[in-house]
Amino acid sequence: MVGRETVRGVPTTHYRITLDDAARAGLAGLEPGARGWFDLSDPEEVRTVDVWVGGDLIRRMQVQSDDSTSTTDYYDFGADIAIEPPDRAG
C-alpha cells in the first residue's frame, strides 16, 4: 500500500504493483482486446501498475512502462446515460 488519497472527491487507498518478468509475460499473453482495456500496447515494458480503490471500486489506474505513463480515472458508476443514434444521411 502506498497510502490514502482522494480521487475525484472519493477517499481511496493507493496500491502499487511492481511487475516481474513472469507478470509481464502474463500480461503479454492476454488477448489484444483485454490489453487495450489497460492501454497495454507493449506489456513486456510495463514496470508498475498503480491502482486507487475507494468504495470497493477501482477509481484510478496508472500503468508505467519504460517510456510512458497512462492514467485512467473511473467515475459516474451507476449514472443514467442517454445514447442518441446519429441522423441517417440520405
Image (spheres, grey):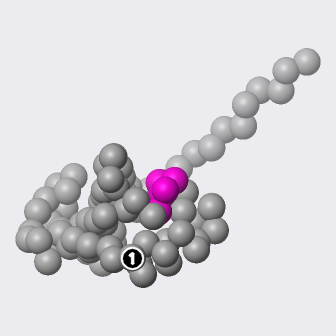
Image quadrant where one finds the C terminus: top right
Q: Is residue 10 magenta?
A: no
User: Which quadrant would residue 79 be assigned to in this image?
Assistant: bottom left
Residue 35: give x, y in percent of width and height: 54, 62
As drawn, which residue projects farthest toward the top?
Answer: 90
Q: Is residue 29 above or below residue 35?
A: below
Q: Secondary structure at mark 1?
A: helix
Q: Is residue 37 above or below residue 15?
A: above
Residue positioned 64% across, 68% down in the render: 31
Residue 28: give x, y in percent of width and height: 53, 69
Residue positioned 39% across, 76% down in the render: 21
Left or right: 12 as drawn, with respect to 69: left
Q: Which residue is mark 1?
A: 21
| Three-letter residue code for mark 1 | Asp
What residue range appears in magenta? 38-43
Residue positioned 62% across, 43% down in the render: 83
